[in-house]
Image (cartoon, rainbow, N blue to C red):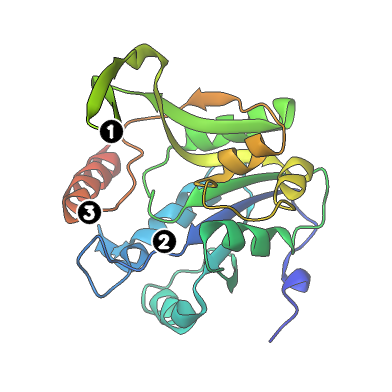
Amino acid sequence: MPDLKSQISNLKSDYAVIVAGGTGSRMQSALPKQFIEIYGQPVLMHTIRAFFESSAAPQIILALNSNYHDLWAELCQRHSFTIPHTVIAGGETRFHSVKNALEIITEANAIVAVHDAVRPLTSKQTIEESFRVAASNGTAVTAVKSRDSIRQLNGDISACLNRDEIYLVQTPQTFRASVLKEAYEQPYTSLFTDDASVVEKAGYRINLIKGDHSNIKITFPEDVIIAEALLSKKAIN
């Protein structure tokens, strides 16, 4: 096994950690959703390309379940996918996958974006803004306002919430490396549903940045159809 730290050069100071731990259970598919082909390539390739083509130009670390490393290498060869990236072993949970990635990032002043592998439609503008805000403020979490009415269920009683105060969190979630590393020294808890929750628990303020409703997370079969349509439209434009 090569030394992973040696694969991370000092040419760039920023990183994107792509978390690809999905198993495909909710997709009703034997193939994990990050490998499902949309618009001619696996979802994961579209996701990596979005970061590579942004002006942020981060070094890319892919945290992938070890059982799928060989499959990923085969897919890269089949699709002539040559965008530089470092593949590491994913952990038991998203928390542990991110923690594994942080172990090979040594620059304290780096900016690190963490992104879902199955969000292939993130715009360059969103990526670039996330790095800009995180560099200035330490944290930048992509989110969109709810379009729907919101109700909170407590037992068998539901109550209306003000949707103008409700934001739906997306990725990328971007932070100064020093902030993220400190936050990930905390013991794991099931309350950590994303990176923002980990960083917030460590005492840091979370700054929200404007996301996009087209930045969908491919979770269910119908999401593939939507992503295909959006990628096709993007290619035409």
The percent position of residue 199, horizontal first and vertical second, equals 66, 39
- Decide: marks 2, 3 in contact (CB < 8 A)? no
Looking at the picture, which amino acid does disc 2 mark?
Met
Mark 3 Cα-neighbour bin, 10 Å: few <14, some 14–19, many ≥20: some
* Secondary structure found at label 2: helix
Looking at the picture, which amino acid does disc 3 mark?
Phe
Q: Which residue is mark 3?
A: 220
Q: Judge depth for marks 2 and 1 and give the one in front.
A: 1
- Figure quadrant of residue 130: top right
Instruction: Mark 3 or mark 1: name the one nearer the start of the chain.
Output: 1
Quadrant for the N terminus in the image: bottom right
Q: CA distance from mark 2 to mark 1?
A: 43 Å
The percent position of residue 207, horizontal first and vertical second, equals 60, 25
- Figure quadrant of residue 165: top left
Front residue of this view, candidates 158 and 93: 158
- Is residue 40 something that shows in the picture? no
Q: Which residue is mark 2?
A: 45
